[in-house]
Amino acid sequence: MGGGFSSEDWKREILAAKTDAEKIRVVTALQRVLGASIKCKNSADKKENPPSAPTLNLRTVFAKFAHQKEKIPIAIVHPTRSASLDGVAMDSTLFRKMMKTCKLLDKDLFPLSACDELHTRHKSEHSKAITFSQFVEKALPEIAAKHGKGVDEITALIIANCE
């Protein structure tokens, strides 16, 4: 495996991986290739500030907290799940832990009871967990409104406090 692989080749490799170890090996190799190409592009654009570490985004922070009970490495890509992480869901306990870790719980603006209510209100009717798309589309705007900030500001807070 190397940089000469096309996206179809990577797709075949990922789908061919049967065990967790094989999946980790393929995804790690893909991350290495993608990381090298990103570093080359960034160093060509900005020679003085090369990237030092991979940056988190909202999806990876959500997945990090959602997988805490399962002890599944985030790097494993399940071939039948979409790339939008809709197969990843977070129960009320982990949702509360994420809000606390990201310093969004506040006695006046967003107390623990409001956090639990929000989770319950925005999860699917017969589910115990909220999916990433439900979190982004429904819960995140409400959290932002309770804090009197924009969704982008709350997203930035979540990412910054969970690194």
Image (cartoon, rainbow, N blue to C red):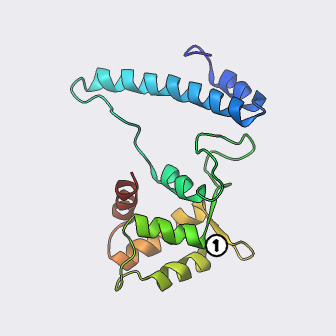
Query: Where residue 129 sits in the image (x, y, percent)?
Result: 65, 68
Q: In the visual, does 132 lie left or right of 104?
A: right
Query: Where residue 29 sits in the image (x, y, percent)?
Result: 58, 24
Residue in the picture at 33% in, 32% down: 51
Residue in the picture at 66% in, 25% down: 10
Seen as rendered, the residue at the extreme left is 48
Which image quadrant is residue 5 in?
top right
| Front residue of 87 and 93 | 93
The residue under label 1 is 123
| Front residue of 34 and 20 | 20
Query: Where residue 9 sits in the image (x, y, percent)?
Result: 68, 21
Amino acid at pointer 1 = Lys
Query: Where residue 25 sits in the image (x, y, percent)?
Result: 64, 28
Q: Secondary structure at mark 1?
A: loop
Q: In the visual, does 5 lie left or right of 111?
A: right
Residue in the picture at 71% in, 47% down: 81
Which image quadrant is residue 135 in?
bottom right
